[in-house]
Image (spheres, helix red, strand yellow):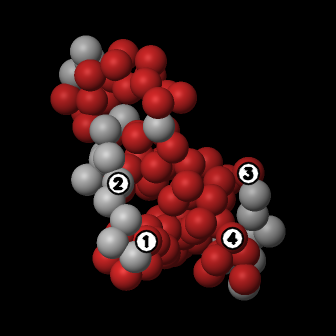
Amino acid sequence: MFDILVIKPIVVEAISEIITKSDLFSPLQNWAKKRDTLVKKLFSCAYCLSVWISFIVCLFFTEHRYPLILEIFIVHRLSNYWHHLYEFIFWKAFAIKDKYE
């Protein structure tokens, strides 16, 4: 249960943020900007990408305790909550500004 509530959502949130905002993935982001609206949106929106990252993480790292689709949506939603908690703690509480705001 701990993996679904904590580990997987944090992994999904981290991967989504890295792909959409990191300089490491800027070639992929630039490539996506030149594509159609769906691809462009997918690689510029961490929320949108987190659905697909949740699918991959749950598909390959699951013990099949729950139906796969249920676990995907649970992990996706919790990853968004972890993201909001991160924003609150680091951006609001400590007044740290991120260059991606």
x, y percent for residue 38: 25, 33
**Residue at (43, 71) in percent of width and height:** 90
x, y percent for residue 9: 57, 68
Report the quarter where the N terminus lies. Answer: bottom right
Question: Which amino acid is tagged 2?
Answer: Asp
Helix, strand or loop at label 3? It is helix
Name the residue beneath numbered marker 3. 60
Name the residue beneath numbered marker 2. 98
- Disc 4 + disc 3, Cβ < 8 Å: no
Q: Earlier in the sequence, mark 3 or mark 1?
A: 3
Q: Is residue 91 visible?
A: yes
- Residue nearer the viewer, 58 or 32: 32
Name the residue beneath numbered marker 4. 7
- Residue nearer the viewer, 93 or 48: 93
Q: Is residue 68 visible?
A: no
Q: Which mark is residue 90?
A: 1
